Image (cartoon, rainbow, N blue to C red):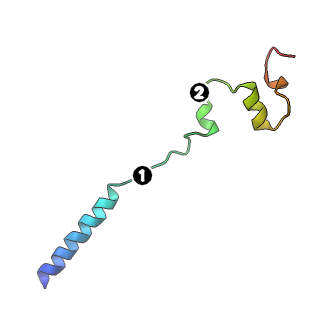
Amino acid sequence: MKLKQIAAFCLLVVFAASFTGCKASASASVGTKSARTNSKPLPPGQAKKMNGDKSAKKYAPGHN
């Protein structure tokens, strides 16, 4: 009887350890606007869409 309890406990420990090794993590900054801070500025059309405007004229420098 004691051997069955020890075997069951060992099996439970191995089963629990197998789940702790499989950790999936997701980064919140992947694909969000904050990830673009170090990259190129937005094109005028994309800035227009983000702000909900109909014209991209005020986001295009040098184009009046």
Q: Residue tagged by mark 1?
A: 24
- Evaluate if marks 2 and 1 touch, with contact meaning CB atoms under 8 Å apart: no
How many neighbours does mark 2 have within 10 angstroms: few (below 14), some (14-19), or many (20 or more)? few
Specify the quadrant that holds the C terminus: top right
In the rendered picture of this protein, how many numbered marks are placed on residues?
2
Q: Is residue 27 left or right of residue 54?
A: left
Q: Is residue 16 left or right of residue 33?
A: left
Q: Is residue 20 left or right of residue 5?
A: right
SS category of the residue bearing label 1: loop
Q: Residue 49 in the image: x percent, y percent? A: 77, 35
Specify the quadrant that holds the N terminus: bottom left
Q: Select label 2 or label 1 by which is in front.
A: 1
Q: Residue 19 in the image: x percent, y percent? A: 33, 60
Q: Residue 9 in the image: x percent, y percent? A: 22, 74
Mark 2 vs mark 1, CA separation in Å: 26 Å
List the single residue furthest toward the right.
64
**Which residue sits at x=60%, y=26%?**
39
Taking depth in this image into account, of 61 and 38 the one nearest to the observer is: 61
Q: Residue tagged by mark 2?
A: 38
